[in-house]
Amino acid sequence: MPGPKDLDPTSSPRAMLGSELRHARERACLTQSELGEPLFVSGSFIGQLEAGTRRMQLEYAVQFDEILGTDGFFTRNCEASARSRYPDHFAEAAEAEAVATEIREYAPLLIPGLLQTEAYARAVFRAYRPTAEEEVIDELVAARLDRTRLLDDPTTPMLWAVLDEAVLRRRVGGAAVMAEALGHVAAVARRHRAIVQVIPFTVGAHACLDGALKLMSFPDAPKLAYVDGPSMGKLIDDPAKVSRYQLTYDLLGAVALPPWDSMVLMESVAQDYAHGAQKP
C-alpha cells in the first residue's frame, strides 16, 4: 500500500504544519491512533491534520510539542498561522475547501460563495453588517472573491451545487445584481466547470429543510461535512455523521431538476430580472 502523499510545505502554513507533524510522529515511531489517544482524538483526525485538511488548534499544538519533543515548534507556528481573513466560524472550512478535490454543496437561501459575483457578495455582506465601514465590507468581499479563484483550475475541485429555488427568487442586491449573479452561475455550469441543480418549490418538503450543507472530499484524508447557521458553523469529521449527510445530499439531488433544466430555469429567471432592471 502506498504511503501518505508528501505535502508541499510552502503551499500554506496548514500544509507545513501537517507535513512536519507526520515527520515528527514517524520519528517518534507512533501510529496516528497512538498519537491521538492522549489527546482524546481519533487516528483519522491526526491524519486530517497531517493531510492539511484540518487546522491545528493551539491546544493540540502544545500537546504535540510535549509528546513529540519538538521544543515548541508546533505551538509557535500554530499561533502564527491562526490568523485568517475569514470569520472564525468559517476559517477552518475555508481552508479545507481550498485543498478539496470534490465539493458538494446545498444552498437553501443564497448562491454558494464559490459561485458569487462581486456585486452579489457585497449585497450579502452589507445586509449582514449594515453599519460596518466600507473598508470592512471591501475586505470581506475580497476574501470571498479569492475563494472563487478555486474554479480557475479547469478540473479541480469538482463542484456540485444544489440550490433551492428560493436562492433564485430572493432579490439580493436588486434585479440587476440578481440578473448578473444567476447569469454567472448558469455560465459556470454551461462551460462544464460545475454541476448545478435547482430544487423547485413544487417539490415541497425535502431532506434538508433545516439549513445549508457542504461535503468535501480529499485525496489523502476522510471526507468532511460543514453545516452552518447565522454567524456559526461546524466542521464534522465523524464518519457516521458524514455518511448520513452524504445520504441527505443524494436525496436532494434525486428531487432536484436535472442540470440542463436547472440551467434553463436559472437563465430564464436571470432574464426576468434583467428586464425588470431595465424598466424605468
Image (spheres, helix red, strand yellow):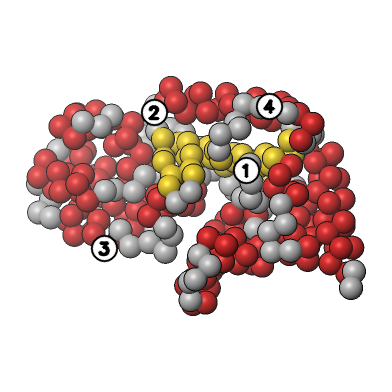
Q: Earlier in the sequence, mark 4 or mark 3?
A: 3
- Distance (Cα) linking label 4 and label 3: 46 Å
Q: Which secondary structure, mark 3?
A: helix
Q: Position of residue 131 (x, y in %)?
A: 49, 71
Tell me the amino acid under the disc marked 3.
Answer: Ala
- Judging by the rendered image, the residue that carries numbered circle 1 is 107
- What is the quadrant of the C terminus in the image? bottom right
Please state if 22 lies on the left or on the right of 175 as rendered: left
Q: Which secondary structure, mark 2?
A: loop
Please state if 33 lies on the left or on the right of 94 as rendered: left
Query: Which residue occupies 50% across, 65% down?
Result: 129
- What is the quadrant of the N terminus in the image? top left
- Distance (Cα) linking label 1 and label 3: 33 Å
Q: Earlier in the sequence, mark 4 or mark 1?
A: 1
Q: Earlier in the sequence, mark 2 or mark 1?
A: 1
Q: Earlier in the sequence, mark 1 or mark 3?
A: 3
Local crowd size for mark 1, using a 10 Å CA cut-off: few (<14), some (14–19), many (≥20) = many
Residue 65 in view (yes/no): yes
- Judging by the rendered image, the residue that carries numbered circle 3 is 80
Q: Position of residue 195 (x, y in %)?
A: 71, 42
- Judging by the rendered image, the residue that carries numbered circle 2 is 238
- Distance (Cα) linking label 4 and label 1: 15 Å
Query: Which residue occupies 56% across, 34% down?
Result: 210
